[in-house]
Amino acid sequence: MKDVVIESEYADEQGNVYTIENEKHEFGYRKSFFTGTNYIILSSKIRLAFGDKNEISSRMNELRDKRNSKQPVTYPSAGSVFKRPEGFFAGKLIEDSGLKGYTIGGAQVSTLHAGFIVNIGGATSKDILDLIEHIQNTVKENFGVVLETEVKVIGE
């Protein structure tokens, strides 16, 4: 993102709106200016490079097909739930804990990629948060690894 985002508009907790530009985003691996804040990104402007339309289309299709084959795109989700712990892959730890397909209410550990929690129907925020906690406890018990969430929970 650091190569394409040129400006972002965000709101603070009081609803005040601000704009930052370019390097002030402080992009790094899974971090940015927004990491550790309660700011909400409202919009971003990006600058793309020119290229051959057919090559770009082909690359987009390739990436879409790769994503669709490895991620549970047929169910609603918030994307990857956990950060990758140093030296491990969260999805593999979850899968090796026997949690693929584990369900609480309408929330389920994806059967396609264990790093995702999907809504298989009627999942509440409590279902999802309880499932996250169960995953964290199980992985810590089995492997001694603490999984940190990548998703940000706002409110209760």
Image (cartoon, rainbow, N blue to C red):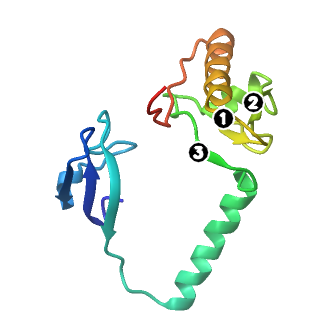
Residue placed under numbered mark 3 in the picture:
78
Q: Between marks 3 and 1, how big is the CA–CA gap?
A: 15 Å
Q: Between marks 2 and 3, how big is the CA–CA gap?
A: 19 Å
Q: How many marks?
A: 3
Residue 5 to residue 85: above or below: below
Q: Disc 3 marks which amino acid?
A: Ala
Mark 3 or mark 1, earlier in chain: 3
Task: Tell whether label 1 touches label 3 (CB within 8 Å).
Answer: no
Residue placed under numbered mark 2 in the picture:
95
Regarding residue 149, the answer to whether it shows in the image is yes
Q: Disc 1 marks which amino acid?
A: Gly
Q: Between marks 1 and 2, how big is the CA–CA gap?
A: 6 Å
Q: Quadrant of residue 35?
A: top left
Q: Quadrant of residue 118?
A: top right
Viewer-side label of 3, 1:
3
Image quadrant in which the N terminus is located: bottom left
Question: Residue 122: x percent and y percent?
Answer: 75, 39
Question: Residue 93: x percent and y percent?
Answer: 67, 26
Mark 2 or mark 3, earlier in chain: 3
Q: Which mark is residue 91?
A: 1
Q: Is residue 130 left or right of residue 99?
A: left
Residue shown at 66% from the left, 35% from the top: 91
Question: Residue 86: x percent and y percent?
Answer: 48, 28
Task: Tell whether label 3 touches label 2 (CB within 8 Å).
Answer: no
Residue shown at 65% from the left, 67% from the top: 64
